[in-house]
Amino acid sequence: MDPGLRFWLRYVDDRGGLTERAGDSTLVVLPPAVAGEFDLPDEFVVTAEPDIAREDGVMLLATGHPVLIQAADAALSDGDVGVISLVAPGTPAPGAELLEQRVRDQVSVEHGRIDVTGLPVRINRPVLRVGALVTYTVSPEECYQERLECWIDAGSGCQLGPDHIARLRAAPRSERPAQAHAPVLDAVSTALRHAHSILDAAAERRRTALSDQASDAHRREHSHARDYYADALRSIERRRTSADPDRAKLLAARAASTREERARRLLEIDEKYQARHVIRPYRLHAVLVPGWRVPVDVRRGPRRYPFAFEWLVSLGTFAEERCPHCGEAATLSVSKTRLGCVSCLPAAG
Ligand SMILES: [Zn+2]
């Protein structure tokens, strides 16, 4: 099905309309408010196939249709914000021995060893899904819009890889409406800063790639302007050398103002081709990923420092943890006096 029509039918479903597919066309029943908003009948048949639309009473609705653009604008302005709970595990936590083995395999601690010290506790760890529409302007003629998305573990601020994202997208969601409790909201607002810098960095990389393509036009326009002013200045100079003193003075002044104009014009051209991007966020989901908090001691000889790791059931892995001392997302390390990481503890330990 045409992606534009598919989007629109989902949009209609979300707004309380009904859609029923029959072959290449779809029967749509709209609530009166939505029908009024889009200036459409309450009930009609749509298709993205021009051949079918030739039949009586079937409306052609495909990418580019004003109704789709209006719906996309509305979806972007309203935003898509909410808390999503993944279904809690139906089985008990893995045994302490297995968890200990897994945490030792996954998390390395310099000069230390991890011992599990107690029973796991059920938790939901918030993961942020942030989506934004980015508009890139690379020249007066070239403007692109693209979608950017990132998933961030709120606890550590670390970005999730494609494999983990795919698993979370596929994980069954709880039917019960999820509550946005204060700790979740706190974690979300802290992680948003990370989300913004991740999206901004990705947009900047993309913008550089796009503006490289525009730089040919920029160079051409720059060199045309330079040639034009060089000609003008040469002609003024030629006239000045053969002119009487009064006129020569006038021409010298004109040459000076032409040079100023050239500088202004070249700056204008550079500004015109100054690539820009604007990030317009439209989606913020807090996905509550079920897991088990596993209490541990990080040991160095007889010294023990209590800590905890969180086993995420849907991902089959422990979440990344930041250094409890300095907050860096670096390899943990343990000294004779405290637990830290390789960036806040001296290398010699
Ligand atoms: Zn540290």
Image: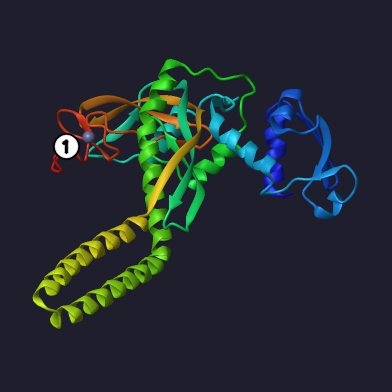
Find residue 149 and report its horizontal and vertical position in percent: 49, 42
Q: In the orientation shown, which residue stands out farthest toward the right?
A: 56
Query: Total marks drawn?
Result: 1
Q: Amino acid at mark 1?
A: Leu
Q: Is residue 82 above or below residue 133?
A: above
Q: Nearer the viewer, residue 304 or 226?
A: 226
The quadrant of the rendering that contains the C terminus is top left
Q: Is residue 236 above or below residue 305?
A: below
Residue picked out by circle 1: 345
Find residue 19 and report its horizontal and vertical position in percent: 79, 34
Find residue 41 and report its horizontal and vertical position in percent: 80, 32
Residue drawn at 53 percent across, 17 percent down: 179
Q: Nearer the viewer, residue 225 or 326?
A: 225
For disc 1, the neighbor class at 10 Å (few under 14, some 14 to 19, many from 20) is some
- Residue 192 position by quadrant: top left
Q: Quadrant of ligand 1?
A: top left
Q: Nearer the viewer, residue 252 or 46?
A: 252
- Residue 107 position by quadrant: top left
Residue drawn at 47 percent across, 36 percent down: 281
Q: Is residue 32 left or right of residue 304?
A: right
Secondary structure at badge 1 equals loop
Q: Nearer the viewer, residue 123 or 230?
A: 230
Q: Is residue 163 left or right of residue 3?
A: left
Can residue 119 be spotted in the picture? no
Q: Is residue 179 above or below residue 60?
A: above
Can residue 55 be spotted in the picture? yes
Does the beta carbon at disc 1 come under 8 Å from ligand 1? Answer: yes
Find residue 136 and report its horizontal and vertical position in percent: 44, 51
Q: Is residue 208 left or right of residue 46?
A: left
Q: Is residue 143 above or below residue 234?
A: above
